Structure formats: structure tokens, C-alpha cells
Amino acid sequence: MSTVGDLSDDEKLGLLQGTLEVLILRSLKLEPNHAYGISQFLQQQSDSEFLVDNGSLYPALQRLLQRKWVAGQWKTSPNGRRARYYSLTPEGRKELLRATSKWERFAIAMAKILAPEG
Amino acid sequence: MRQWWSKIQRALGRRRKLTSELEQEMDAHVHFLIEKNLQQGMTPDEARTAARREFGNMATVQERSYESWQFPQFESLLQDIRYALRGIVKAPTLSLLVILTLAAGIGANTAIFSFVNAVLLRPLPYPSADRLAILWSGLGYSGRAPFSSFEVFQLRQHSTQFDQIAGIWVTNGALPGDGPAEQIKVADVTSNFLPLLCPRPALGRFFGPQDDLENAPSTIILTHGVWVRRFGSDPTIIGRSVRYGRHRSTVVGVLPSDFRLIFPNDASVPPNVEVFESIPVGPWQADGPAFLHVIGRLRNGATFGAAQSEMNSAAAQINKLGGRASMGSFKVSVFPLQADTVREVRPTLLCLFGGVGLVLLIGCANIANLLMARARRRLRETTIRAALGASRGRLARQFLTESLLLGILGSIAALVTGYAAIHVILAARPPSFVNFDRVTLDARVLAFTFVVSLGTSVLFGLAPVFSVRQIDLTRDLRESNRQTTGLRRRWASALVSAEVALAFVLLTSTGLLMRTFINILHTDPGFRSGDVFTFRVSVPGYAPLKLIQQKLGALPRVQSASAVSHLPLDDAGNWYDYYYREGASATEQTSVMADHRSTLPGYFTTIGAVLLEGRDFTDADDAQHQHVAIIDDVLARQLWAGESAIGHKINLSDSPQGFYQFQRDWAVIVGVVHHVQYHSLTAIVRPQIYVSYPLAPRPSMSFVLQTSGSDTGLVAAVRNTVDAVNKDIPITHVEPMQLLVDRAHAESRFASLLATLLSAIALVLATSGIYGVLSYAVAQRTTEIGIRMAIGAPRAQVLRMIFADGFASILPGLLAGFLLCLAVTPLLAHLLYGVEPTNLANYVVMLVGVLVVSALATFLPARRAMKIDPLTALRYE
């Protein structure tokens, strides 16, 4: 039940706990988007490395709504379909900044340790 | 509750909205996917199928999204409640049985606890009630005696721990105001007494120093009751001079309607005082009579311990000053007023509280058994649900929800029965339970009921939960659900043992209380009550009193008439003092205290008191002739053991000059009479000294009439007789002497009545418990019994088998009950009279009783087992 990808399941990257929510926030940084758009964005940006399972995406969106980091609004899409567009709230923007810096530090630290010696 | 409900509705509404939004959102999502697929060149059909596949399982997405809102816990609770309600409705008999058991068990607990709460826990309704103390003087044998005015003055001088020390003395007096004469209780109080117990008067003022001045005008304060009854709630009463006995007095205050006097029973301060007069306290008359009952208020921050040690040194100081104190070791005891007031009621209440606790435990055991049996019957259903994926925790929670729901229903029923029980008990309460009219279902009682129901629900609710833990899927699905595991049988049998043990403890205790009651009924009060009538009068002096006696004696149905200052078993307004024989040493002079009674000739024959030696008073025994006294056999033995008391001289306090003009005097003993129970039926509190009325005149006396034939018209005849002498003489309490005796029985009757009721409930519960468990066992073993009989087991053997089964749990229960009794019954010692807690006969009777009843409870299911038809039984499976 994954989104379609060219890689076999074993090769794809599973998402670490809590990362999906940060990625959703990032995907909404520039403009509001609907669930389908978010999943397309994540897949494209990660060069289809990340699987975005709807069974994870939707609950994650609900959690973000509950924390008031995103707000939902029903709008008509360019091709004339009504969809719920999610947008970042000011708190969501703050949280994105916080999480981004955390993840950068984490990634650098991981890279330092994993980098080949010499 | 409403708030909670709207929360639920909001949650449910939100869920509906969320559902529709999610559906639309996912729908849009799928359409985006379809459009993408169409763009990639698929046919519409292919595009739709692929999109659905790509999206994944919609139901899962939905389910997980709900979970993020934490609905499920709440919903499963609702589901549990719905399920539990269905379970309760589906088994109405069982549910009703459980609820009724709880209503009885928790209801009894609620009722008794509301008494414990009102009497033992709630502070007295006085300002700074926790700082109020009662003080008792001790001299010689008695440690709970009143104080003289001189002593109260000295206590005040020496006290730093008390900010107030006040005294009260209750006597009989006339109802103030115009209208028919009536005798009432009047209290003489020190001017600081009322402010200690009452924040402010309803009208006017309290007494002040101006009322204590030597030639101050006579002033009185009325209770709310008298103000309403006698003065029609007249708001202008303050400052008015009203008729008061043979004088006039100015009303200076009216007390609020909720003011009550709450004193220990032996303080002779009854709650029905209606008028207060002020009495000054001063350093005069060091050997004056001790009559004031004293209370004090501790200074802020002072402790009872500090107050007691201060009073010890004050007593030592007073010892040096003279008066009666100079004759011996004068002591002062300080107790918290609240604790001292409930001193006598406390053990009764606590025993009853323990008793209802036992009843509730038995009820719990019964319910646990019922629920376990049902859980077992539902085993197949439970097992299937477990097989379908319900977690053990969820199943256990469901059972617990059901128990809690039953508990809640039971406790609602219990509040109703408890409320009714309170009123029944209030109606049956003995007079000694003075504080009992403050009993209500207040917040604390409700909290108690709630906690008890919760506790009991968990207690009996755990039984079926425990059985869930035992589920073994493979075994239980395969096996018939009618087979009983050994474990369940062991549990049921342990519960029956516990019930029998608890019921035995209750029955044994009740047996002791009933024995006590019977003993009290058969005590010899020292007088005859059957044909004696009494009434009280306030008399201006000897001549009219004598005239009334003569006229009453001449009435057709009156055999003899006489009067006494204090009726037997009427403890209010008591009068006692120190007495000593001629030649007594200084210490002995204060070692004997005796009741002091003033009588007319003929008193002993009228009430049937036995004159053991010497003679009764005659009309010639007045102040002008030799001063004489009659004593009871108890005093005679104390002072002149081994010889006749007749002719000896005794030093006493009398007042031949007039009311209250006391002096020490010598009197010659002319008679010895059998002891009369003046205070209680069970205890000899003090010996008695009788003095002829002219030597000890009293403003109020009680007449006793020995009558024959019916009482009709007697009251009118008495009234006419007294009126013929003086229309202004108030008479009250025209009642048979038997009433006083009945009142004295009341406490014991009350205790044994309640205990009998509790035991009856306990016995019914325990019996039905035994019956239930065995009936269930017989039903379970129908097949087995059928087979046994089919292969030739005689019916008697089947009967024996079931009996053995029953008694295997009854006998250990009896043993445990006996051991419990050894620990518990000594706690009853306070309440018993004439019977030891370890009374063997009582044990034997109760043992036989429990055996007979449990044999009966065993016999019914055993007979059913015996009648089992092997053929039917085999087909039954």
C-alpha cells in the first residue's frame, strides 16, 4: 500500500519516527497544498526515495491540525475540484524552523560519524 | 453532569464532521490520482482501478485518523457501558438481587455512618467548638462531680489557659408569662455561659456583669421555643417585666431557634431547658454546695494537656484554701466537651458500624458468587470474543464496567434505603443519643457512600475479572461451558466459608446484646412501677404540699400518695453531696458521696421500696424535733459494715431555714431502705440518703401515687385536687412510673434491636449464599449425579455427597467465625450487662442456630439432586 515507485520496497527509505510531520510542514512552506499535492511534493523532492503511505499521511495531517501547526481550508483546485488545502500557521512556521535546525544538526552529526576516516 | 454530557455530544458531533470531511478529502485525492493516470494515457477504467490501488485502504486511513483524535478510548467506554447495561437488563433477576443486596448492605452503612458523622465526627454546633472543654471535680470516689461557686471563682483566678470558665445548673421552675401554670426546666448560668455556646441572641442581649450585682433586678433569657409558645413571638418582649413563678422578672434576651444544650448525660444538663437565669460567682462560702457543671473555652493556642496540668496545680491551690476541698484531695479533670458528650454513645455506635461493615462484606461475598457464576455461564461467549481478538484487558474492563454500573445502581438504591433507615433509627433512638437530631445525609455521608460503593463494586467486580484471566482458548472452546473447574469451586467454597464466619460473628454479638437486654429487663430497680403514677409540682412550701398529699390520698382509686424530690431513673437536676459518720477522719469525710433526696412520709411503701430496718418518716420528723435520716443499704454497708446503722449519727447538708439555705447538720439514722436505681438500671452510681421534707424543703417535688383499677380520669382528678389547694401550682409530667423504666431500657433495646436486624440480614444473606452456591454446584453436576445414579448409587449417597460438599465450606467458616469472635466480642464488653463476652451458652446456641440454618440451605439443593432422573440428566447434556 505504498505510493508507486521504481525501487523495490527493501531499497526504499522508511521514514524515521516524527520525520513525516516535519516534511509536511516543509512542503507547505511556500504555498498551501492538499493531501495529494503534499504526497506528490514529498515523492518528487526525495527523488522517490521516500514512501508516503496515505495511512501515515492522513493521521499526521490530523495531528498537525490538532497542534494547530497547520490550518485546513476547503478550496477549489485549478482543475475545478474541491479539496482541503493545508497552510502553515505562525506556530507551524516556528516549529518548522525549530525542527529544521534540529534535523540539520542531527544530519551533520550523523555524517561526521559515518564519514570515511582520513 | 450536563456539562459532561454536552462534552460527549460535542465529541460525537466532531467525529461526524471529521468523518464527512475525511471522506471528501480522500475522494478528492483519488480523483487527483485518476486525473494523473488519465494523463499518463490509461483508459478511464484502468485509471480508476490504479488510483484506488495507489491510494491504499481507505478504511485504514480513516481508522488511523480517528485514532489520532483519541476517540477510541472514549467510544470503547461507551460501548462497555452499553454492553454492561444490556447484560444487566438481560438478567433481571440476578441484577435485582445484586442491587437489593447492595441497597441493604450499603444502605445500612450509609445510615449508621450518618450517625457516626453527626455524633462523632461533626463538631458541636458551637463557636470554636474544638476549644470547648468540660471540667469535672473529683473528691473521694467520684471523679465526675460538679463545682461550688467558690471553686469556680478560684478556677478562674488560677487559670491562664482558659479565656472563659462558665457554669450551669439546671433545676425545675415555673414557665414565665401569664396563662396556665406549667413546670419547666430552668438553668442558672454564670453570665459568661451563653456567649460560649451561642454567637449572638436572636433578640436583646446575653447576661452581663450588671446582672450579677447584689441588688440587680431579676432578669431572664428565653429560649426561642418559649418565646413563640408563651409570648406569641412578641418582638417587643425585650425589657418587659413578666410573671415568673411567684415573682416578676425582666426578659433581657431571646435565644436563636437553633440553640441547643448538648452535654454529657451524667452532667444533668438536659437539652429541654427553656429559661435561663444568671447566677453570680464569687469567693464567698468556701464550703458551699457543689452544683455547677462547668465548661471552659481554651485560650487560642492552648492545649487540653496544658489546661489539665494547669488545673492540677489550681486544684492543689484550692486544696489549701478551705471549704470541702480542705477535707481531702480535690481534683479537677479537663476533657474536650465533644469527646465527653459522646463518651457513652461512642462504643454503641462503633459496634453498630462494625456490624454493618460485616453485613456489607457478606453481601459482597454473595454478589461475587453470583457474578462469578454468571461469568462462568458466559464463558463460551467470552471465549469466542477473546478468539475474535478482544484483549484480556478489554474483557476485564467490560466485566468491571458492569460491576461498577451495578454498584452505582445499588448505591442509588442504598441512598434511598439509607435515608429511610435514618428516620426509622431516629424514631427508635434512646434518649441518651442526644445529638442525634442533627443526623442528615450531608456531603461527607454522600462521599462515604460513594467510596463504599466503589470499593464494594471493585471487590465483587474482581471475581468475574479473575475468571477471565483463566480463559484458555483451546480448552474452553472445546469443552462444554457447564463444566466447573476446580478453581472456581474452591473460590465459591471460600466465599461461603467467609460468609458463614462473618454471620457467626454477628449472631454471637447479637446474642450477647440480647442477653444484656433481657438481663436489664429483669434487673430489680428497687421499686415497683406497674401501678405507680407520677407527676411534678412546683410548691410554695410545706403546708400546701402536705395538703395535696392528704387530698390525693383520699381519692377513690389512690391507695397511697407521697412525694420525693427526685424520681428514680429521672437523672436530670440531680442533687448529691458528701456525707460522713460520727468520728470520721478528715479524709473519710470526703470519701462518701450520696444522692440526697427529700421526701414525705409514705414514699417507700408507695413505690414499693423495701424498708429493711427501722422506720419510715412520720409527720413529726420536722426541724423542731430530732433531725433524722433514712439511708439505703449500700451506704449502711459502707459506713457501718457488720452492724446496724440504726441510731448512728450522720453528718449531712440540709436547709431547715428554707430553700437553698444550706448548713451542715447531724441527723440520726432511723431507717435503712433497699437501694433504688435512680440513675440507670445497671449501675449503682451512688448510695442514697433520704431526709424528711421539712428539713430539706425544695421548690419542686414529684408526687408518686399507688393506684388501683384503670387510669382513666386520674389526670383530671389530680389536676382538680391540686387546683383545689392552689390554682397557681404548676403540674407537669403526669405519667406512669413505667415510662421512666421504659426510657431506661431504651438504649439497650435500641442496641439489641439494631443488632438483631443486622444479624437477620446477615443470616438471610449467608443462607442464600450457601443455597446459591450449592444449587449451582448441583446444576453443574447434574450429568455426573445422573451417571452415578444410573450405575446404582443410592439416593442417600447422593444426599450425603451434596451435604459433604456444603459442610466442607460451612464447618471451616464456623471455625474461622469462632476465632474471629474471640477477637471481636471483647470489644462489646462496654455494652454488656450480666453476661461475659465469652459466654459459652451463647456460643452453643448460635452454633446450633447456624448449623440448623445452613443444613436447611444445604438440604434444598441436595433434595433436588436426589430427585434427579438419570435418564433426563444424561439427555440434558
Image: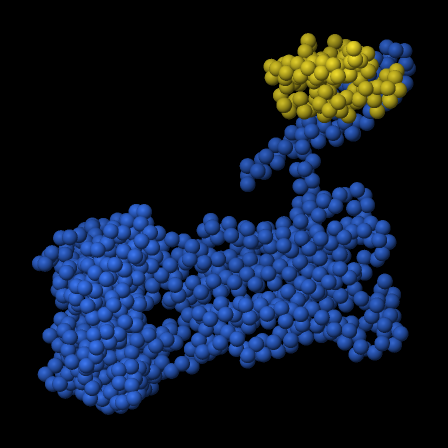
- Foreground residue among B529 and A112: A112
Which residue is located at x 19 percent, y 81 percent? B583
Residue B181 in the image, given as x and y percentages of width and height? 20, 68
> What colour scheme governs how the chains and residues are painted in the rendered image of this protein?
by chain
* B701 sits to left or right of B454: left
* A82 sits to left or right of B150: right
- Name above or below for residue B713 compared with residue B37: below
- Foreground residue among B656 and A80: B656
- Name above or below for residue A10 compared with residue B268: above
Residue B92 in the image, given as x and y percentages of width and height? 68, 56
Which residue is located at x 64 percent, y 19 percent? A69
In which quadrant of the rendered view does residue B247 lie? bottom left
Q: Indicate the quadrant containing the N terminus of chain B: top left, top right, bottom left or bottom right.
A: top right
- Name above or below for residue B679 compared with residue A34: below
- Tell me the yellow chain: A
Residue B743 in the image, given as x and y percentages of width and height? 37, 72
Work out whether residue B81 can be spotted: yes
Work out whether residue B763 can be spotted: no
Q: Colour of chain B?
A: blue
In which quadrant of the rendered view does residue B786 lie? bottom right
Which residue is located at x 21 percent, y 55 percent? B158
Q: Indicate the quadrant containing the C terminus of chain B: top left, top right, bottom left or bottom right.
A: bottom right
